[in-house]
Image (tube, grey):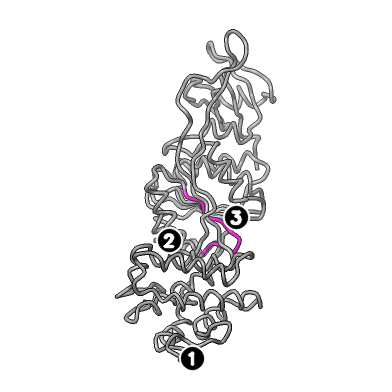
Amino acid sequence: MDDSNWVVLSEPEGKIYVIELSEGVTKIKGIGVIDTTATLGQLEIGDSVQFGNKLFTRVVPRLTELTKGMKRRAQTISAKDAGLFIAKLGIGPGDHVLEAGLGSAGLSMHIARSLGDSGLHVTVEPRSEHAEVGLENLRRAKEIWPQFPTHHHVEGFIEEVVDDIKKHSDKFDAIILDLPQHAPAIEAVAPLLSIGGRIACYCPVTSQVELAWKACESAGLIVEWAGELMERKWGMASKGGMRPVNGAFGHTAFLLFAYRNAMNLMIQAIIRSTLILLSQEGQLNRNGTVEPRGTPNLLSQFGHETLLSSLILHSLKPSSSSSDSLSLSSSFSSSAVNSSLDEDFFLIVLTTTRRIIAANQPPARILILALLLKERPNGSETPEGGNCGPSMSTVKVLESSELVLESI
């Protein structure tokens, strides 16, 4: 930090100027041509100076002042939304934060201020003209503030520069995406999210929120919250009391937050592997995705990952019992679109999964046992009178299980 080279001035109405001291005369927009070192170098905090008919006061260069006086090119994320990002993501000292969409670095400065000296901040921006402005604002903050995190910048589209990001850190406690298209980015960076970490998306329109939500669920994340923040300013009324200040409500964008825990990976593995059981012709690709053919009607109506996630998550609730799972499954059987759903298999997977989780078995063992132990908890026989041993499709899944686990 070398804040002796910087002076922050404020006009009475609140306009902020962040000025770097230099030898010789310099033209400063809004002030004029001055020798910054000779004119401003001796000003103390709270001292005032006049240029022309304008009065300026030197102020403390806190986050509020630097964001007000920042250079701008791209539209910035407001303090209202930035504050929610910091709070809901739980960003603090020592964290590793990945931010895609640097822009003018409005949010980046909030992140840097929260991380302090011990954090790591990696920013990504494909547009060099935006990055130039954003990086200059971060340079100012680094030189002015007493603490600043380790910062690295990567140029490019985030889904194309994951390997470059990994050079700085292979795990992040928080990931923030301010992008036109969130789904490809979520798919690319979700594996970088630490267990217990969170990902946030900044979406200008609701259609982007919907796509981001689906992408998070497909990546094995739990969506915690999605919505918007409305800001409304109030002021003193002329005849006393308070009233809203005239103007539009302060909507800026829609926000989404998703969480990764240890259970997500197990559930994702079960979902992907169970899909093969539901489609005899299913094919597991090397990237871990499933291409089912001949999928049952119920799955085509509800979406296979959404349906299976709801069933499995329901069985994991502490208050759930096997009868609860049966009741939930039966509600699907009464639907008109249930023609070929193997509900008995669902119950076996759900009951077995709960049993193994209770025994604190690792995810890989949960996956294999949930698929291999095709037996009812009470040892009863199948409707056809035979034992519920592993089927040929189960064998296919077991052969692919190692590949599935590696892919997630």
**Element type where label 2 sits in the image:** loop
Question: What percent of the width, then of the height, locates residue 178?
Answer: 45, 48
Question: What percent of the width, then of the height, locates residue 214?
Answer: 42, 57
Q: Nearer the viewer, residue 51 or 295?
A: 295
Q: Nearer the viewer, residue 168 or 172?
A: 172
Q: Is residue 297 left or right of residue 120?
A: left
Query: Mark 2 packing: few (<14 Cα in 10 Å), some, or many (20+)?
Result: some
Residue flagged by tag 2: what amino acid is it? Val
| Residue found at x 46% / y 78% | 344
Q: Is residue 158 left or right of residue 37?
A: left
Tell us which disc is closer to us: 1 or 2: 1
Which callout, 3 or 1, points at the residue further toward the start of the chain?
3
Q: CA distance from mark 3 to mark 1?
A: 56 Å
**Disc 3 target residue:** 120
Q: Residue furthest bottom?
A: 386
Which callout, 1 or 2, points at the residue further toward the start of the chain?
2
Residue flagged by tag 1: what amino acid is it? Asn
Tell us which disc is closer to us: 3 or 1: 1
Rendered image quadrant of residue 168: bottom right
Query: Mark 1 packing: few (<14 Cα in 10 Å), some, or many (20+)?
Result: some
Task: Write down the region rendered in magenta.
Answer: 192-201
Q: CA distance from mark 2 to mark 3?
A: 18 Å
Answer above or below: position of 385 versus 174: below
**Element type where label 3 sits in the image:** strand
Circles 1 and 2: CB atoms closer than 8 Å: no
- What is the number of the mark on residue 161? 2
Q: What kind of secondary structure does the magenta stretch mostly adopt?
A: strand
**Disc 1 target residue:** 387
Q: CA distance from mark 1 to mark 2?
A: 51 Å
Question: What percent of the width, then of the height, locates residue 17?
Answer: 54, 27
Answer above or below: position of 16 versus 130: above
Q: Nearer the viewer, residue 330 or 394?
A: 330
